[in-house]
Amino acid sequence: MNKISALQKARAAYQPKLPPAFANGAMVKVIEGAKTSCVADADKISQYFSATFGSPELTFQPGQSGTLPALTVGVILSGGQAPGGHNVIAGLYDGLKSLNPASKLYGFLKGPDGLIKGEQILLTDEIIDAYRNTGGFDMIGSGRTKLETEEHFKSAQKHCEELGIKSLVIIGGDDSNTNACLLAEYYKKNGIGINVIGCPKTIDGDLKNDCIETSFGFDTACRVYSELIGNIGRDANSAKKYWHFIKLMGRSASHIALECALQTQPNIAIISEEVAARKMTLKDLVENIAEVVAARADRGMNFGVALIPEGLIEFIPEMKTLIASLNDLLAQEAETFNSLFDTSEKLQFISSRLSQDSSFVFSSLPREIQVQLCLDRDPHGNVQVSLIETEKMLAEMVRVRLNELKSAGVYKGKFSAQTHFFGYEGRCAAPSNYDADYCYSLGYTAAALLGAGATGYMASVRNTTKPASEWVAGGIPITMMMNVERRHGQDKPVIQKALVKLDGAPFREFAAHRAEWAVETSYVYPGPIQYFGPSEVCDQVTKTLMLERE
């Protein structure tokens, strides 16, 4: 038997809170709203999803006690890990059992691959109880296979029918839920009796809208990162000799960087969406950071903390152009490039074949970053942006700029940098009370949607800045979140990513204070996630969510 920690023992006994709609289990009264549309491109989306488009928003109220026919359901964890995934499954399991104790839940192994290949386990009380309120996706595993072809849909149908599965729940991010929507549409349009429900997951926080307040895992991950940032801030303020450049997860949006900035008050926090909106160059960014470093040095403070979102490099217009040029060049000249053995030759080869502007940008980068841009490729031949050490790049370029300022007699301080990347540390943490409650409620909501015969919906739990006794559960048509985007040279229907809104309350709160935080040492030290104690300590919500809902 595996040993478990004292905290795991205590957390296993925690009973997550539920919305009042589930007073009698997942047997609910369903209130239908008006027909829905989508965020953009309604004409095209309605054609892509002729069977499911326009479905009404659903809201739940407590129903009469009773029993439905037993349901057999399959569940999939899709994409990267996020704290609380196990509680979604536990909530789904308990919700199904509340509808009928004979209901069954199968977990498909290693994500969508398990559904396509027919690899699954029957989830039991013993399995579920061992994973309640724990982090990670290790109960059934996850994967990044996309469910998007008719071959996939038919293979999934075959394996569901072999097990008697009439419903699927896909727990994932925007791409995974886009695939859930495609799957639901295919089955409904072709009269195949398999309903599909999605649950919103991603620590990046970019799957949200008016009806989906937040994606699960965001709360916990930001608290883990903020604890670490606070620890580093305390160390910086103690040693008083290092500038810490910290890269944080969030390739497509900067929600994590913004939330962590609001929680910890660093000297610098770069928001990628602002960089893109202001068309800032790499030189602009370096200059801005160097100015803050110099201003603090003038006050005798040769230390600081800077937060950098993972996807920053793709939001800088000149870098985005450079990366696109590199992708094309290395695809077209792959044979010649790969025949070169010396790294310097390879870098010279690249620089000589880029446009004048891109070549200038490329040459301005630290050699280590040049190598990463050229040599680290994904299976499709593209630059692996997430592997580029942006934090090291900025630290080095700021050092060079400060030396120039020192030579000009403008800067007289000392600069020594430490770099960090906080990513995987937060993806499988034990969920905060908020995520434990929210995820369990999402799973229970998914069970209620299946009991109501819904398909093509995402589980929704709202009003979560209030006590759970005021939470509102229901379902949102996934088509409501869709628009059409260009992907790999083709128009495709996808869930629209939620980027940081520069006119939104969280960014405005940050912008109102960052000038003060830059020159003052205003660090906040959040400390570790608290699971026990006063509600104001252990039941907090993110500052982002609180500001958005005020």
Image: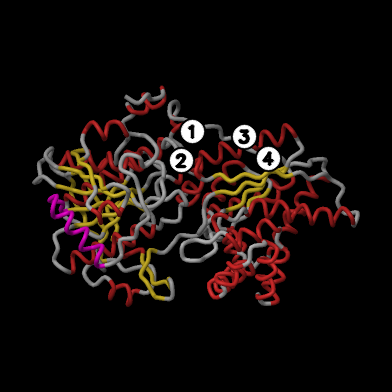
Of pointers 4 and 3, the one earlier in the residue sequence: 3
The stretch drawn in magenta includes residue 410? no
The stretch drawn in magenta includes residue 154? yes
> Which mark is in front, 4 or 3?
3
For the residues labelled 3 and 2, the Cα–Cα distance comes to 17 Å
How packed is label 2: few (under 14 Cα within 10 Å), some, or many (20 or more)? many
In the image, what residue type sits under mark 4? Ser
Q: State the predominant SS element of the stretch in magenta.
A: helix
Badge number at residue 522: 4
In the image, what residue type sits under mark 1? Ile
> Which mark is in front, 2 or 4?
2
Q: Is residue 202 left or right of residue 423?
A: left
Residue at image position (79%, 55%) is 400
> CB atoms at circles 3 and 2 under 8 Å apart?
no
Q: Is residue 1 above or below residue 431?
A: above
Residues rendered magenta in the picture: 150-166
Label 2 residue SS: helix
For the residues labelled 2 and 4, the Cα–Cα distance comes to 23 Å
Task: Work out whether residue 118 or residue 67 is closer to the camera in this orientation and state it.
Answer: 118
For the residues labelled 1 and 2, the Cα–Cα distance comes to 8 Å
Q: Is residue 308 above or below residue 499?
A: above
Of pointers 1 and 3, the one earlier in the residue sequence: 3
Check disc 3 and report the residue beneath it.
231
The answer to whether residue 224 is visible is yes
> CB atoms at circles 4 and 3 under 8 Å apart?
no
Quadrant of residue 326 in the image? bottom right
For the residues labelled 4 and 3, the Cα–Cα distance comes to 13 Å
